[in-house]
Amino acid sequence: MWSVVVRCSGRILGHVNASDGGPGVFAWIKQLTPGDTVEITREDGTVAVFAVERGEQYSKHAFPTQAVYGNTEGPELRLITCDGYDPATGTFNDNYVVYAKIVA
């Protein structure tokens, strides 16, 4: 269960795979499509509902730090994980970011 306090914008980072090789908390993240909702339970027990706008894959060498971590005009959410697995190196070369805005 996630518990996040969102005042302006929030970011949640998670892995697509677990340390034992199984699915991680964000194994499903690329299945989110525009219009899907993400519910975040706030510290006071109320629930913030965010609508997915889009998901984007970025090379770690061209990561849009300001777009992902910068200020927003209203409550927004970013879900961030690793992507672009390279079996030759065993590392992830990219990140995947879901952008969402509050709807309730």
Image (cartoon, rainbow, N blue to C red):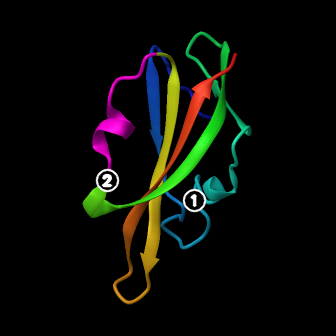
Residue at (47%, 65%) from the top-left corner? Answer: 83
- Against 12, is 20 above or below? below
Q: Is residue 43 left or right of residue 93?
A: right
Residue at (44%, 86%) from the top-left corner? Answer: 87
Residue at (58%, 54%) from the top-left corner? Answer: 26
- Name the residue furthest right: 36
Instruction: Kindly report the distance in space between the C-alpha atoms of the residues bearing marks 1 and 2.
Output: 22 Å
Residue 70 image point, x, y percent: 32, 30
Magenta extent = 64-73
- Dot 1: within a 10 Å radius of its alpha carbon, few (fewer than 14), some, or many (20 or more) residues? some
User: Which quadrant of the view contains residue 82?
Assistant: bottom left
Give the residue at mark 1.
24
Q: In this view, does 57 lie to the left or right of 54?
A: left
Quarter holding the N terminus?
top right
- Against 18, is 98 above or below? above
Residue 57 image point, x, y percent: 47, 59
Residue at (39%, 70%) from the top-left corner? Answer: 92
**Mark nearer the N terminus (1 vs 2):** 1
Give the residue at mark 2.
63
Magenta span contains residue 69: yes
**Type of amino acid under label 2:** Phe
- Dot 2: within a 10 Å radius of its alpha carbon, few (fewer than 14), some, or many (20 or more) residues? some
- Against 23, is 32 above or below? above
Magenta span contains residue 24: no
Check disc 1 and report its element: helix, strand or loop.
loop
- Name the residue furthest bottom: 88
Check disc 2 and report its element: helix, strand or loop.
loop
- Name the residue furthest left: 61
User: Which quadrant of the view contains residue 24?
Assistant: bottom right
Q: Which of 2 and 96 is in front in this view?
A: 96
Q: Is residue 80 left or right of residue 59?
A: right
